[in-house]
Image: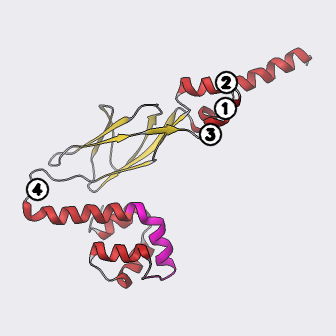
Amino acid sequence: MTNRRKYSAAALLLLLSACGTVFGGMDQMLTFDANVKGVKIFIDGMEACKTPCVFPVKRSSSATIITAKKDGYEDKQIALRSNLNTVAILNLTFWPSWLTDVATGGMWQYSRDSIYVDMEKENLAAADYDQTKRDVAVRRFALFAFPDLRLEAAAGNTAGEYMTALSALTDKDAHSLLNVVNGASSPVGLAHTLTGITQ
C-alpha cells in the first residue's frame, strides 16, 4: 500500500471515529415500569410500548416528553432531559468526529436509563389519598436508595441511615425489613414488595 493510500485510510478512519455515536449509538435503550401493569408509554406523542418494557429512544439535545396512560388512571407526564454524553467529549480534539456526533445525536444522553411511573386512580377517594401518598413515598425511596439499602441490609445494619428511614416510612421494624431488602432482586422489586404490589 502506498503512503498516499495509508494516509487516506487513516484519515477516513478518523472521520468515522465519532466516539459518542460509535459507543453510544443514536438511540438510548430506556426501561419503563409502573405500579400497575400495561401502562401505555407515549414518547413525544407516539405510542412506544406497554409497561414493563424496554424501548430505544432517539438521543436529542432537547427534552423528550414521556406520557403514561391507562384506563381508570390519571395521565402522567415526565420531561426526560438530556445531558452531554461524556464519551463525546473525547471528540473535541478532532472536530470532524465531533460534528458526526452532533449530526447523529450521539453527543447527547438522557439523564437516566430507567423511568418508573406512579399512576394514580381517577377520582381517588379522600380516604385513600393518604395511603396512596405514603405508598408513592415508599416506592420512590426504595428506587433511589436501593444500593445503600442493600449495603446496610447485607451488613445487618438495622441502625443505618437508610434502613432507619425505610423503617420510618413503612412503619415497620427495621429487623423485619432486613429479609425484604436482602431478598429484593431489583429496585422495582423492592418498591413493589414494600407496597404490596404483585406483578
Q: Of the residues shown, which amino acid type is indicated by label 4?
A: Leu
Residue type at tag 2: Trp
Badge 1 marks a residue whose secondary structure is helix
Write the residue at 55% across / 23% down. Answer: 103
Q: Which residue is mark 4?
A: 124
Query: From what the image shows, is residue 182 above or below residue 102?
Result: below
Disc nearer the start of the sequence (4/1): 1
Q: Disc 2 to disc 1, how far (Cα)?
A: 7 Å
Residue 80 image point, x, y percent:
38, 40
| Quadrant holding the N terminus | top right
Q: CA distance from mark 2 to mark 4?
A: 55 Å
Q: Nearer the viewer, residue 28 or 51?
A: 28
SS type, badge 4: loop
Q: Which stretch did the figure color magenta?
A: 143-158
The tag earlier along the polypeptide, 2 or 4, is: 2
- Residue drawn 80% across the image and 21% down it: 9
Which residue, given by chain and number where applicable, does mark 2 sit on?
Answer: 95
Do labels 2 and 4 touch, CB within 8 Å? no
The amino acid marked with disc number 3 is Val
Q: Position of residue 43 (x, y in %)?
A: 34, 35
Other-residue count near label 4 (Cα within 10 Å), few / some / many at <14 / 14–19 / ≥20 = few
Rendered image: mark on residue 15: none
Question: What residue sits right under mark 3 in the picture?
Answer: 87
Horizontal arrangement in the rendering, residue 149 relative to residue 128 (left or right): right
Is mark 2 in CB contact (under 8 Å) with mark 1? yes
Q: How is the image coloured?
A: secondary structure
Q: Amino acid at mark 1?
A: Asn
Which-is-in-front pick, marks 4 and 3? 3
For label 1, the residue is 91
CA neighbours of label 3 inside 10 A, class few (<14), some (14 to 19), many (20+):
some
Q: State the separation of the CA atoms marked 4 and 3.
A: 46 Å
Of badges 2 and 3, the one in the foreground is: 2
